[in-house]
Image: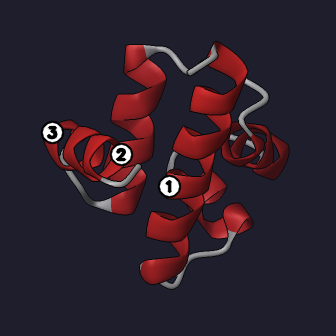
Amino acid sequence: MDKELQLQKFGKKIKEIRESKGLTQAQLAHKIDKDRESIARLERGAVNPTYLYLLEICGGLEITIEELMKLTTTDN
């Protein structure tokens, strides 16, 4: 699978988790001190997030990075 498709699938999973927590992009962004557009880019798969950025996202979503990786690798 190519990198672009992987990033899109990963972003879609982030969006699903965020929505399941009842958060808007703006609310998640506020929780982690980012702007809404940075969350939108992540969810579109337009960015390749760093490990530290993923830790911030996980903190905002109140999940561990291990949970995020499990959720994104088991749902193909």
Circle 1 crowding by C-alpha within 10 Å: few under 14, some 14–19, many from 20: some
- Label drawn at residue 52: none
Instruction: Reply above or below: 75 against 45.
Output: below
Which of pointers 3 and 2 indicates the residue nearer the eye? 2
- Label drawn at residue 66: 3
Q: Which residue is mark 2?
A: 72
Q: How many marks?
A: 3
The answer to whether any part of residue 36 appears in the image is yes
Badge 1 vs badge 2, beta-carbon distance below 8 Å:
yes
**Tag 2: amino acid:** Thr
Q: Report whether 14 appears left or right of 75.
A: right
- Label drawn at residue 13: 1
Query: Rounded to the nearest whole Å, what is the CA distance between mark 3 and mark 1?
Result: 14 Å
N-term-proximal mark, 3 vs 1: 1
Q: Give the x, y percent position of residue 11.
A: 61, 45
Instruction: Reply above or below: 63 against 46.
Output: below
Q: Report whether 19 appears left or right of 4.
A: left
Q: Report whether 67 appears left or right of 23.
A: left
Query: Rounded to the nearest whole Å, what is the CA distance between mark 1 and mark 2?
Result: 6 Å
Which of pointers 3 and 1 indicates the residue nearer the eye? 1
Instruction: Please report the residue visible at 53 percent of the width from the left and 41 percent of the height from the top.
Output: 10
Instruction: Please report the residue visible at 55 percent of the width from the left and 77 percent of the height from the top.
Output: 19
Q: Give the x, y percent position of residue 13.
A: 50, 55
Q: Nearer the viewer, residue 57 or 4?
A: 4
N-term-proximal mark, 3 vs 2: 3
**Tag 1: amino acid:** Lys
The answer to whether any part of residue 33 appears in the image is no
Circle 3 crowding by C-alpha within 10 Å: few under 14, some 14–19, many from 20: few
